[in-house]
Amino acid sequence: MTDLPGRENDPNENPFAMFGDPEQIAAAMRQFADMLSAPPSSGPVNWDMAKNVARHVVVAEGDPSVMEGERRQIVDALNLADLWLNEATALPSGVNNPQAWSRSEWIEKTVPVWQKLCDPIAARMVETMSGTLGAAGLPAEAQAMAGPLMGMMKQMGGMMVGQQIGQAVGSLALEVIGSTDIGLPLSDSAALLPGGVAAFSQGLETPAEEIRLYLALREAAHHRLFQHVPWLRAHLLGAVEEYARGITVDASALEEQLRGLDINNPEQLQQALSGGNLLKPEETERQKAALSRLETMLALVEGWVGTVVDGAAEGKLPSATALAETVRRRRATGGPAEQTFATLVGLELRPRRLREAAVLWQALEADRGMDGRDAVWDHPDLMPTADDLEAPERFVRGEPELDLSSLEASLRDGEDATGDRTGKAGDEDGKGGDEDEDGRRDGGA
């Protein structure tokens, strides 16, 4: 709190004195004016600002436009990969408009999905942060007069969250290869980033054409799954939203961190905005269970993609096995950007059981063939669970035991046995009824 001359003994006379000189506050706020431009109805996050922050991140590292030659190479690779996949899966093509993106284009194309993923969590954080920033320390009678200030603080909270989201999305853009790296459907279009493909290729003693084609196979396989398994997209995004709805934020810990911020010091505010600790949500048991279900489904998606791509590349790409292992390690361990996003959103969008899922899909294919393997995607109730990943053979063998014809036969047998017993009982009852009836007649006589 800033002491004002002559008001040391009467802090309630000016309830906003704790924030310092109004002119200094105005000067600080003007430095963030361009970040506070989103109307209140646009949601908890200023997404225009978040996109700008993300673009600044990738531009600072270099983000050249896609050249025509690069674009043609990517489109050709995606089209050829899609043809190869026809021999490896029963699902039809999902590549309708293959594209090549720069990192900035990846940001622009994927923001609508990030908005869907982040808004539920951001809303909770903004409410907590704005209440902490605006109401902490105000006398009760002054809070009723602080409506405009609360609105400003709510925008401030949205600015903080938007800054963090922009930083995380921009960092991810520096690492991604296509539109499906994190296992979620970020776009309806199959696309690869020439810059991402080049970064992935560094240090690999494999021809660039093979690497590009292998990565195109993975991108095209993901899109077959997301385009032709109607429930999958909503299932994955819905799981993230369900996780977000249960997020709780430790208001007391957040308040403790924000108490040390000097609102008159733009540099200190900017430094606070660049860290992820302010926005780390607490995980409840419910969120842990939801996270486990989400990780299982992500592992199943990745395991299926890996199995299908291996089948499509067999005999065509000599380096397919080595590239598969490189992708698996990269996907399983994640990078700094994924860790940043995990801190922000509260969960890690990557599977942890890739090998187990791949073994399960391979066992299904060996037992039921390609069509039988892919038929498991027909309904979410048919999908393997986390326990099935522990014992894939049991899942594969257990399916025939659930054959409806066997179930119907057992039900008929049970009905026949019950019917026999019922018939005998009915005869006895019938005789009893005659005797009773006769008895009543005799009695009446």
Image: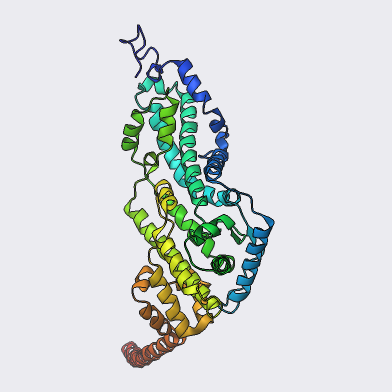
Residue 12 in sight from this viewpoint: yes
Q: Quadrant of residue 126?
A: top left
Instruction: From the top left corner, tell me how far across and down residue 429 is, in percent.
Output: 34, 89
Seen from this angle, which residue lies furthest right? 68
Residue 257 as seen in the image, left or right of residue 305: left
Viewer-nearest residue: 200 or 442: 200
Please identify the quarter of the rendering in which residue 34 is found. top right
Residue 350 vs 357, above or below: the answer is: above
Nearer to me, 179 or 317: 317
Residue found 44% across the figure and 50% down from its top = 337
Q: Residue at x 37, y 92 (%)?
A: 420
Relative vertical location of residue 67 with respect to residue 394 in this rendering, above or below: above
Q: How many marks?
A: 0
Residue at the image position 64 percent from the left and 63 percent from the top: 73
Quadrant of the snapshot with the C terminus? bottom left
The N terminus sits in image quarter: top left
294 or 414: nearer the eye? 294
Q: Where's residue 267, x and y in %?
A: 43, 28
Give coordinates of residue 425: x percent, y percent. 34, 90
**What colouring method underlies this structural image?**
rainbow
Q: Is residue 422 above or below residue 95?
A: below
Whether residue 224 is visible to the viewer of this picture, yes or no, is: no
Q: Residue at x 45, y 55 (%)?
A: 240
The x, y position of residue 147, in whole percent, is 47, 25
Query: What residue occupies the far top of the structure in this picture?
Result: 6
